[in-house]
Image: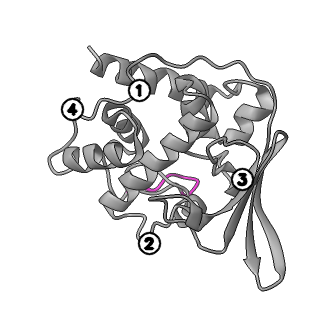
């Protein structure tokens, strides 16, 4: 998750037209004074300071062709190839957020090469390379704490999978370049870095399914 990710890149699952607050979402530790408004046109998150409302981000809805990446979306018992001490955390995070642990591992391997203290040139941090603003929105206190970082990355992957109807390529592209870029181009953005990222992470993930 690198140079193209801004505050607007925190995607939310696509629900029916509604308004809800962070406290309405089970097992999600978002800031309490945040309200999500979702309709057929856009998803917008607001935070409140007394009577003042500030938009944190907005994602406009647009028709987009998606392709669910198959029946293997989540297998809690799948073996995970990761450094000692991290595999169990990945499995726990995957079970919590309903993501295949092999996908979480593939993203972590590509993002940080398993370095918990990794910092990219654009400021993305930790094993899952979360931008500080995204980490704060996900409720992460210490972005370099391996467990918090992996749980945050797994949750972010889950929201992207929900947003893009289970399309793996679009999910990975959004993780790297931000969901706004995917929406803008109606698919994987024409960025060499993002296209290479999608290809490599998908290859690693698919190899782990065999």
Point out the image quarter for the N terminus.
Answer: top right
Q: Residue 101 — which label?
A: none
- At 50% from the left and 52% from the top, the residue drawn is 120
In contact (CB < 8 Å): disc 1 and disc 4: no
Secondary structure found at label 1: loop
Q: Residue 141 — which label?
A: 2
Q: Earlier in the sequence, mark 1 or mark 3?
A: 3
Secondary structure found at label 3: helix
Residue identified by numbered label 4:
77
Residue identified by numbered label 1:
73
User: Looking at the image, is 145 positioned above or below residue 208?
Assistant: below
Q: CA distance from mark 1 to mark 4?
A: 12 Å
Range of magenta residues:
118-123
Residue 139: x and y in percent read 50, 67
Secondary structure found at label 2: loop
Q: CA distance from mark 1 to mark 3?
A: 26 Å
Secondary structure found at label 4: loop
- At 75% from the left and 82% from the top, the residue drawn is 49
In contact (CB < 8 Å): disc 2 and disc 1: no
Q: Quadrant of residue 177?
A: top right
Query: Dot 3: few (<14), some (14–19), or many (≥20) neighbours within 10 Å?
Result: some
- At 40% from the left and 40% from the top, the residue drawn is 98
Residue nearest the viewer, comparing 6 with 94: 94
Q: CA distance from mark 2 to mark 1?
A: 29 Å
Q: Quadrant of residue 210?
A: top left
Residue identified by numbered label 3:
8
In contact (CB < 8 Å): disc 4 and disc 2: no
Residue 48: x and y in percent read 75, 76
In the image, 174: left or right of 27? right
């Amino acid at each position: 998750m690198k140079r193209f990710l801004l505050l607007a890149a925190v995607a939310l699952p696509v629900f029916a037209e509604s308004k809800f607050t962070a406290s309405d979402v089970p097992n999600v530790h978002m800031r309490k004074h945040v309200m999500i408004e979702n309709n057929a046109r856009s998803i917008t998150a607001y935070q409140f300071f007394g009577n003042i409302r500030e938009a944190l981000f907005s994602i406009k809805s647009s028709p987009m062709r998606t392709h669910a990446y198959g029946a293997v979306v989540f297998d809690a018992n799948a073996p995970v190839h990761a450094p000692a001490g991290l595999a169990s955390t990945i499995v726990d995070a995957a079970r919590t957020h309903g993501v295949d642990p092999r996908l979480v591992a593939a993203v972590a391997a590509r993002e940080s090469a398993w370095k918990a203290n990794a910092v990219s040139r654009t400021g993305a941090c930790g094993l899952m390379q979360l931008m500080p603003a995204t980490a704060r929105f996900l409720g992460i206190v210490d972005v370099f704490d391996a467990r918090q970082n992996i749980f945050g990355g797994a949750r972010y992957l889950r929201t992207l999978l929900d947003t893009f109807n289970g399309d793996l390529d679009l999910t990975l592209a959004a993780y790297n370049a931000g969901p706004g870029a995917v929406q803008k181009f109606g698919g994987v953005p024409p960025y060499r870095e993002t296209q290479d990222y999608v290809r490599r992470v998908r290859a690693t993930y698919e190899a782990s399914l065999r």
